[in-house]
Amino acid sequence: MTVNPRAPHTPNATSGIAAATTDLSKVYGSGDNRVVALNRVNASFREGEFTAIMGPSGSGKSTLMHCSAGLDSFDSGSVRIGTTELGTLNDRQLTALRRDRIGFVFQAFNLLPTLTALENITLPLTIAGRKPDRQWLDRVVSMIGLSQRLDHRPGQLSGGQQQRVAVARALVSRPAIVFADEPTGNLDSRAGAEVLGFLHDSVRELGQTVVVVTHDPVAAGYADRVVFLADGCLVDEMSQPTPDGVLDRMKGFDARARTS
Ligand code: ADP
Ligand code: MG
């Protein structure tokens, strides 16, 4: 089957936007400890697109991901996954939406050490009491390149292999969108490239929608688009980024930060 990653998955279902934030704001603490982590952020993530989020440490990247994925509350504005407004959901509905429509990959792989790789991958379905879509599972599993190691436990796998298992777990329920927060942060560059390559393949071959936080211009070069955050604000974006182009843009931010 040939999948055109740019084509909407189901005609008329949505406007082709997998997730979007509107004037999203999030404040931590109060008084002297008050931190505006997100300041009226308008971001949208198109279906079948690979987006990288970049920005200095503390600029709000994780907060944006957590709020967009329904893992964290926000103070004002709105978030929608497809056509569903997160703010209208009760806790039970939000849990179901996270389970069925969102995949999340953390920097720490967060695999269960007593389960095999394959059991870890299918765990979200097991918990939901759902049977895997066999064809989808086979495609995801064949793409991670671990067919000889599916019965290994995480402790028997390298960091890069563990993270690929974690990505497969995020993909297994065929979510509307996968968020990955610095998924290569604990990996050397080669293992990191394999994880990013897998995420990239999931976009190109499976039509997945993926959003990745990264510090690495080379990693951002895998994306279709980069959005830049600074001090909780979305300050810039770049289409079809190259590592050199991203590096140049980041230098520009640093220079501005020094002169402001
Ligand atoms: P990034 O992922 O870009 O490094 P974060 O989203 O983690 O940034 O953080 C954005 C800002 O919010 C930072 O100033 C951070 O210190 C603050 N922050 C994040 N989480 C918390 C928290 N749980 N309590 C208080 N402040 C927080
Ligand atoms: Mg972070």
Image (cartoon, rainbow, N blue to C red):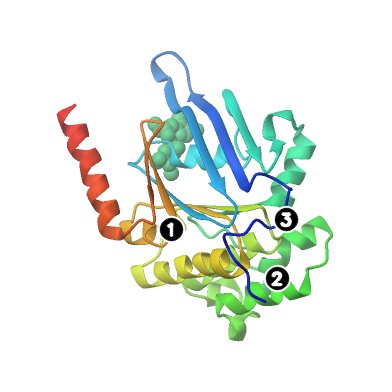
Position in image of residue 6 (x %, y %): 57, 59
* Mark 1 vs ligand 1: CB below 8 Å: no
Task: State the separation of the CA atoms marked 2 and 3.
Answer: 30 Å
> Which amino acid lies under the numbered mark 2 shown in the image of this protein?
Glu
| Classed neighbour count for the residue bearing mark 2: other residues with Cα under 10 Å, few (<14), some (14–19), many (≥20) | many
Label 3 residue SS: loop
Q: Earlier in the sequence, mark 1 or mark 2?
A: 2
Q: Nearer the viewer, residue 176 or 238?
A: 238
Quadrant location, the N terminus: bottom right
Q: Residue beneath label 2, please?
A: 119
Label 1 residue SS: loop
* Ligand 1's quadrant: top left
Task: State the separation of the CA atoms marked 1 and 2.
Answer: 30 Å
* 177 relative position to 200: left or right: right
Residue located at (32% from left, 56% from top): 217
Q: Nearer the viewer, residue 213 or 235?
A: 235
Q: Residue beneath label 1, please?
A: 223
Q: Residue beneath label 3, please?
A: 10
Position in image of residue 24 (x %, y %): 53, 28
Position in image of residue 219 (x %, y %): 38, 60
* 123 relative position to 230: left or right: right
Q: Earlier in the sequence, mark 1 or mark 3?
A: 3
Residue located at (40% from left, 69% from top): 193
Q: Is residue 163 visible?
A: no
| Classed neighbour count for the residue bearing mark 3: other residues with Cα under 10 Å, few (<14), some (14–19), many (≥20) | few
Outermost residue, bottom side: 148
Task: State the separation of the CA atoms marked 1 and 3.
Answer: 23 Å
Label 2 residue SS: helix
Label 2 or label 3, whichever lies nearer to me, is 3
User: Is residue 177 positioned above or below 204 on the image?
Assistant: above
> Which amino acid lies under the numbered mark 3 shown in the image of this protein?
Thr
Q: Quadrant of residue 152?
A: bottom right
